[in-house]
Image (cartoon, helix red, strand yellow):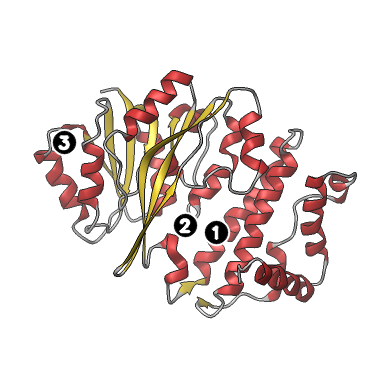
Amino acid sequence: MKYEVTIGIPVYNVENYIRETLESALNQSFESIEFLVLDDRGTDGSMAIVRELQTSHPRGCDIRVITQPYNMGIGHGRNRIIDEASGRYLFFLDSDDVLPPHAIKQLYSAAQTYQAQIVYGSHYRIEEYGVERRIIANTNEFMLFVKVDDFANYAFEKYGNISANVWKYLIDINIYRENNLRFPIINFWEDFYMTIDLPTYIQRAVFIPDVTYHYYSRYGTLSNNQKRDHISKQEVLDIVHAIGHLKENGARIAAKSYFLKRTLKVMMTEFYMVCYILKHHDVIHPSFTACELHDMIKSPLRMNELLGISSWKLKNLCFYILGVFPSYVSVSVIKIVGRFKHLI
């Protein structure tokens, strides 16, 4: 059966949340939806709840379960959803978050009205840490991009112009498939890796002010490392390696007007990662050496690419110089700047 939209839901050990999440998807006012649940071989009762909703909910027949051979992680899971989805458009829903009732209808309507390849909705961030709870609204202004490179130029103009979260948007699935876009096989920041270059493949994009997602931020999850008491160095290294690959694969867009902007965004991410490691050095085991941090901050640009005067060249030059300094000098400078920006 063909659907207009696939909602892809990777599931792994979310027994306490999956019922509310899946019901929020099943209760959408938009009709033509495939609910594609990926079973990543968890050890709790999550999938029993999914199976029960398959039989008890009026739209249960539209739930399709695909099962991994073993626990393969979120990056691999998202890739399989891209491969298996039947919908014309794809929307990722994390298995502990919630959709407002008209979310897909609002996103799809905007995609049709503006013939957009991607539609970004607004969201609420709901922070829950024990008894603490607060709601933060993240609302878009309406924006429409229709000219070649306009969306990419906007995306890289400021670090935070485009959210790194793949649950923020409804996307024409052919953007993924025709460009062979794949998530890295990591369990955190896999969405940043995907979204950093996504605008370079898209011409028509739209932002809408409608709230189409409720994102829950909870203690102990991968997206909240700041609350954890122990972090494996390998977990961080997996992310570092993914960012390193982003540094290396910029040659594809070297002739584009946004090339230096994109490079700076990747380097800023490396800077934030180094600051994060320095801030949480006491819970990351084993620890990082100064040489490892120095290698992370090295720019992929060559000096000849930085010749001339422009704000983007000068900003990138700062990272180039950090990579040339001895490791102890570079790390000392990062500590000073990080403390000044309240990152450390």
Q: Quadrant of the N terminus?
A: top left
Mark 2 vs 3: CB contact within 8 A: no
Type of amino acid at the residue the image marks with label 3: Gly
The answer to which quarter of the image holds residue 148 is top right
Reading the image, the residue beneath label 3 is 60
Q: Can residue 68 be seen in this view?
A: no
Q: In this view, does 17 lie to the left or right of 261?
A: left
Earlier-in-chain disc, 1 versus 3 = 3
Residue 188 numbered tag: 2
Q: What residue type is labelled 2?
A: Phe
Q: Where is residue 13 in the image (x, y as percent from the top left)?
A: 27, 59
Helix, strand or loop at label 2? It is: loop
Residue located beneath label 1 in the image: 239
Between 323 and 157, the one lying in front of the other is 157
Dot 3, crowdedness within 10 Å: few (<14), some or many (≥20)?
A: some
* Contact? badges 2 and 1 (CB < 8 Å): yes
Q: How crowded is mark 1: few (under 14 residues within 10 Å), some or many (20 or more)?
A: many
Residue 224 coordinates in the image, percent (x, y)? 43, 64
Q: From the viewer's perspective, tell me whether residue 218 is left or right of residue 277.
A: left
- What's the residue at 35%, 32% (across, down)? 85
Question: In this view, which residue lies farthest toward the left?
Answer: 56
The amino acid marked with disc number 1 is: Ile
The residue positioned 82% from the left and 51% from the top of the image is 314
